[in-house]
Image (cartoon, grey):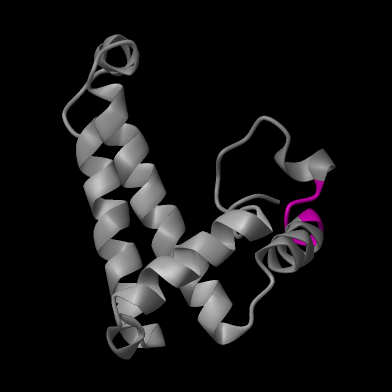
Amino acid sequence: MIKSELLEKLIAFRRERDWEQFHNPKDLAISLSIEAAELLEWFQWKTNDEIVVQLDSDKRESLEDEVADVAVYLTYLCHDLGIDLNQAIAAKIKKNAIKYPIEKVKGRSDKYNEYS
C-alpha cells in the first residue's frame, strides 16, 4: 500500500542498521501488535468530543507516529513473507462480500454468525 520508493527507503533503513536479524515473522507480528496497542492508548478513556479536540492539537503528531509504526511493521512483515498487501486486501473484500451480504447486514453491527 505504500509507494515503492518509500518501501525501498524503509528496507534500506532497516538494512543499514542490520536489523533484519531481529525481524523474523514472529517478532514482527509481536511488534505489530504492540504498536497497535500503543495506537489504542491514544484513544483510551477519551470521549468522541475529546478525541476531536486532540485531533486539532499538537497531540495529533503522536497519533500519526503510532499509525506509522503500525504501518512500518505491517510493511516489513508483508515484504518479508512475500505478501502483496493490495492483493490480500482485494481477496479479503471478495470473501467479506460473501460473508456479509448487503441485504442481511446493511446498517447492522452484529457479528456474521448472529444475523439471520
Q: Position of residue 107 (x, y in %)?
A: 67, 30
Residue 70 figure quarter: bottom left
Residue numbers of the magenta segment: 97-101
Name the residue located 73 percent from the left edge and 58 percent from the top edge: 96
Question: In the image shown, does 8 or 26 lie closer to the viewer?
Answer: 8
In the orientation shown, which residue stands out farthest toward the left? Answer: 45
Q: Residue at x 56, y 62 (%)?
A: 7
Q: Position of residue 33 (x, y in %)?
A: 31, 64
Q: At 51% across and 65% down in the image, what residue appears?
A: 75
Looking at the image, residue 109 sits to the left or right of residue 60; the answer is right
69 versus 16 height, above or below: above
- Camera-side residue: 60 or 5? 5
- Does the magenta run of residues contain 28? no
- Residue 103 position (above or below residue 69): above
Q: Is residue 112 visible in the rendered structure shown here?
A: no
- Front-lying residue, 8 or 46: 8
Residue occupying the far front of the picture: 16
Quadrant (top left, top right, bottom left, bottom right) of the N terminus: bottom right
SS majority, magenta: helix
Decide: is 36 above or below 106.
Answer: below
Position of residue 47 measured from the top left corner of the image (x, y, whole percent): 25, 18
Q: Can residue 16 be spotted in the picture? A: yes
Total labels drawn = 0
- Which image quadrant is residue 44 in? top left
> Residue at position x 30%, y 82% from top?
18
